[in-house]
Amino acid sequence: MEWSSKSHPGAKIKRYFWYNDAAMITLKIRLQALVYEYLKDAYPVTPGDIEFTVPPQAKLGDLALTLPFQTAKRQRTNPRAMAQDMMARLGSLPGVVRMEVAGAGFINLFLDQDAFFAERRRALGTTALRAAERKVIVEHTNINPNKAAHIGHLRNACLGDTLVRALRFKGETVEAQNYIDDTGVQVVDVVFGILEREKKSPADLDRIERFDFYCWDLYARTAAYLETDPAAQARKAEMLKAIEHGTGPEGAMAHYVSRRILRAHLATMKRIGASYDVLPCESSIIGLKFWDKAFALLQEKQGIYFVEDGPNAGCWVMKLEDEEDKEKIIVRSNGTVTYVGKDIAYQMWKFGLLERDFYYEPFSEEEGRPVWISTATPNDRGLHFGGGTRVYNVIDTRQSYLQKVVVQGLRALQFRGQADKSTHFSYEMVALSPRSMRELGVPIPAEDADKAFHEVSGRKGLGVKADDLLDRLEEKAFTEVDKRNADLSPETKRRTAREIARGSLRYFMLKFARNSLLIFDFDEALSFEGETGPYLQYTCVRLNSIFRKLEEREGTTAESVDRMVRGDAPSLGLLPEAERNDAWELLTFSSQFDDEALRSLESLEFSHMAKFAFALAQKCNGYYHKYPILSEADPDLKAIRILVIAVVRDVLVRALDLMGIPVPERM
RNA sequence: GCGCCCGUAGCUCAGCUGGAUAGAGCAUUUGGCUUCGAACCAAAGGGUCGGGAGUUCGAAUCUCUCCGGGCGCGCCA
């Protein structure tokens, strides 16, 4: 870049200085800088004021400056008159063929179409985004390993895995972590059920297929039983202790249950294309005494203090920032650590602040790459995880309060920078519609009769199991594929059905804003029409099919298309006006991919990316319906059309990949 | 009680760092398969953006207030 960040101190400009490849973002940066240069003497502008928006209609222009509004507000004058004056001062801008003042004071810019088109083709397959961190840690999924995964867990994993993908798209080095609470009360409940109620041996359990489904029911039964028998609490407490220390038949059973269920969870997540680098376990945290180190640090830095009397006598507590009268208990009077305390220690490990690490051993494989699980047993592999410079915890909104306390814990330890870079990626829970309840055959209790939705509860065994939903999606997809592509081999049909199920589920989980409660409805989730994953996949499949036919009928191979992309193209000016407008809209809209990816990352709102991809697919479908490619006789028109859909396909496929949605060969 | 979230078309939801005529899918109605795939496309109807007040050139978007719904606030995890 030819200008220095020193002369452009505005936050927005500075932010964009990381990026220097060809894309809409680059054009905007270039224009921002020039507009600032031309106007800074006449107006009290800062580069941050110079923002570009997209006009509501293509005919109004390609980009709009809203600067006159901000400036007129400050100077209490008429924005439209100011816009006129500013436009005159701007004279001409490179890459811009025309400007006009519109509405109440917008300055609309019309871009040089052929230059932009050439730039777009040159930038095919690239992104202008750049990494900003040394290492980003994303923790997601985190399912208690005591029962099958349900739709709530799917929402977590889809959001988390998409965050991982989006960060990697941006160029960040990302570590995907899936925390396993293998010593918690949920596992204890199941172990209690197996040992005390069902009296089953590991050999008995080996014979059970779909072990996660078996535990789903067992957990609900046991939880219900434990509520009726207070005497069992003592036995349960004993078990918890044994499990935490990894001793006795209880410890062995907890290990058996958690590992077997974990394998089932990983298999389920693999179906939606989510994978992990490392699986840190609670048992390792206990075994390696991470807490002791954190506790020492908290005492040393006076982040916590001992309470002598009052209701919290005998506890170590932390003061809360905005609630001065409140004390959060970190260590109980019996000397045990609370959940938040352990979480603070764990968050410290993620940032590499604990000065200790786990040992690791391979647990499973993902595409030939090992997935590592933590262990407290030393080995000489010398592997290290954690130590990120930025951490995202994907956890539902009900844990907001505790996540806040964890961050405050870091502050209390004077790790301010790390506290600022700890993000709770929160999202609303998934609930069931009354219709879904009926479909599951679950009776609705009388007191809940007027409720619009019903909370999913693993404890009550109430919910839609992830694998059941995926099975239904696959089954339906298979029927649809079979209907249209009877000639495909059964294996291909099955593979395609899996890809469609995955695309369908992932889009469904991303299309809603994360803050909105997702009231699950089978009909909606199983739909393949309209704003759905299969619609997006179908669009890509058809685009690919056009290129395939081009090759079959005319020998236009991928290589020759690539040469066309890299070479000179006929001028868009050769197109009739209506078509030129349509092609132009497709080109400018698709060029906002980087901006959309960045916006999604900054707002952690992947529904933006979902809507962008959907809108692009809609425009694209409309385009090739209107303008046939194979049958076009005019070589220039044909070349332009091929290039336009080549550009759009590139963006669409990458947008889907960012969301973890695969593109089948045929469907 | 305190804190956070939600309320937009018949239904499900986008749009919320203020910006041009409030959008999409589903459902309803109508039209389009002999053409690159109809999981598609084209079109129609459908809105006091929960109510009220304020801020301003401009409010679905920001502020206040009220109403309705949800979640959280434990020596549980």
Image (cartoon, coloured by chain):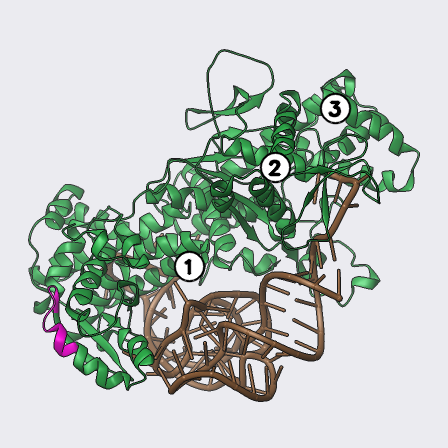
Q: Determine the colour of chain A.
A: green
Front: mark 2 or 3: 2
**Residue A238 occupies which quadrant of the picture?**
top right
Please indicate whether residue A635 sits to the left or right of residue A170 in the image.
left
Q: Is residue A434 visible?
A: no
Chain assignment, label 1? A
What's under tag 1, amino acid-wise? His
What's under tag 2, amino acid-wise? Ile
**Residue A432 occupies which quadrant of the picture?**
bottom right
Q: Earlier in the sequence, mark 2 or mark 3?
A: 3
- The residue under label 2 is A344
Q: Earlier in the sequence, mark 1 or mark 3?
A: 3
* Viewer-nearest residue: A664 or A49: A49
Residue A238 vertical position relative to residue A86 in the rendered view, above or below:
above
* Viewer-nearest residue: A399 or A427: A399
Q: Callout 2: 10 Å neighbours few (<14), some, many (20+)?
A: many
* Span colored in magenta: A87-96
Q: Is mark 2 in CB contact (under 8 Å) with mark 3?
A: no
Q: Is residue A439 visible?
A: yes
For the residues marked 2 and 1, what is the alpha-carbon distance in whole angstroms? Answer: 32 Å
Percent of width and height locating residue A656: 37, 49
Please indicate whether residue A211 sits to the left or right of residue A609 in the image.
right
